[in-house]
Image: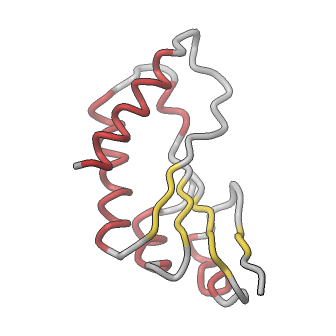
């Protein structure tokens, strides 16, 4: 029996009942447009929550406190609902000539995960 994943960049927040009904579902994409808290509540431990946080936080004013609070909200929701969480920063089309922001984002994320 093969396992499957579902989703990409669409907001599945209101479609999770249908997605969770798929046979052998193992991984569900939670896009930056989805409500990560509601998704974590619905998915629980039934599948891997493959969260893609908002990549736009790498541009403009790189606000470490805002990024930390944003990531904490998603991580706390996953933990509270017994989720298996993976976090993937993708669709990063620009960092405005500040590649060090990637390292800093990962550092912030790791800190929040370890918290």
Left or right: 25, with 89 as reference point: right
Residue at far left of view? 115
- Is 60 situated above or below 64? above
Residue at far front of view? 1
- Is 97 situated above or below 55? above
In the picture, residue 14 is in which quadrant?
bottom right
The residue depicted at 63 percent of the width and 21 percent of the height is 94
* Residue 4 percent location from the top left of the image: 73, 75
* Number of marks: 0
Left or right: 71, with 4 as reference point: left
In the picture, residue 19 is in which quadrant?
bottom right
The residue depicted at 63 percent of the width and 40 percent of the height is 90
Left or right: 25, with 61 as reference point: right
- Is 105 situated above or below 30? above
The residue depicted at 40 percent of the width and 22 percent of the height is 62
Residue at far right of view? 2
Q: How is the image coloured?
A: secondary structure
- Is 108 situated above or below 52? above
* Residue 70 percent location from the top left of the image: 35, 46
* Residue 79 percent location from the top left of the image: 32, 67
Question: Could you tell me which quadrant the N terminus lies in?
Answer: bottom right
Left or right: 65, with 92 as reference point: left
């Amino acid at each position: 029996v093969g396992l499957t994943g579902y989703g990409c960049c669409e907001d599945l927040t209101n479609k999770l009942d249908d997605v969770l009904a798929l046979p052998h579902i193992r991984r569900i994409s939670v896009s930056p447009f989805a409500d990560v808290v509601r998704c974590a509540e619905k998915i629980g431990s039934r599948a891997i929550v493959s969260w893609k946080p908002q990549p736009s936080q790498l541009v403009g004013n790189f606000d470490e406190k805002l990024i930390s609070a944003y990531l904490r909200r998603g991580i706390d929701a996953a933990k509270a609902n017994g989720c298996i969480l993976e976090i993937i920063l993708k669709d990063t089309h620009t960092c405005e000539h500040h590649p060090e922001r990637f390292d800093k984002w990962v550092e912030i994320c790791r800190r929040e995960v370890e918290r």
